[in-house]
Image (spheres, grey):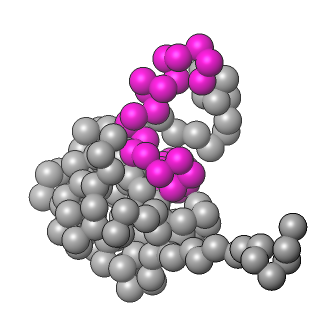
Amino acid sequence: MNTHTLRKSAPASSVTQAAAGALIAAVHTVAARIGFTAAVAVTDQAGHLKAFDRADEAPFLTAEVALDKAWTAASFRIPTHTWNDYLADPQVAPLAGHPRLTAVGGGYPILENGRCIGGLGISGGSYQQDRQAAEEALTALGFELSGH
């Protein structure tokens, strides 16, 4: 192999701190409108925490769940609610034992120009409310929603 033509790295885009903060604010706005308080986690494309906020009234467990939803969404670049169907497959079901995998609505990859630049995780409402808040916040800021 010729080392002069060997590709040694790949560019990795990450959600900015400003965009992460704007997503958190947008989620809290939607959550207040539809009637719940939330913990909101934003990770980079590798699932590492970028920004986080938990409303005063949100239960403490929501913090960990929000982070795990964001991590799950960024890890496979699919929304967390899609995992229930995947885990029903006996060939995939063993992944349910992974301590961070969260197959509950409210986690979405943050997509820009078809590339995953992070993960968004919301916890505090029902899975439908968490999912709605994620979708509305991402759409309001011009991010793409995953087709899954």
Residue lying farthest to the top in this orientation: 90
On the question of residue 122 being in view, the answer is yes
Residue 124 within the segment the image draws in magenta: no
Front-most of 97 and 33?
Answer: 97
At 67% across and 39% down in the image, what residue appears? 99
Residue lying farthest left?
33
Work out which quarter of the rendered image holds the N terminus and state it.
bottom right
Q: Is residue 59 visible?
A: no
Taking the image as shown, residue 91 lies to the left or right of residue 143, namely: right
The residue drawn where x is 42% and y is 24% is 85
Q: Residue pushed farthest bottom?
A: 18
The spot of residue 119 in percent (x, y) is 46, 60
* Magenta span contains residue 86: yes
Location of residue 133 (image quadrant): bottom left
Residue 17: x and y in percent read 45, 83
Q: Main secondary structure of the magenta part?
A: helix
Where, by quadrant of the figure, is residue 121 drawn?
Answer: bottom left
Q: Residue shown at 29%/46% (left/top)?
A: 147
Read off the magenta span.
Answer: 64-92
User: In the image, is residue 103 above or below residue 130?
Assistant: above
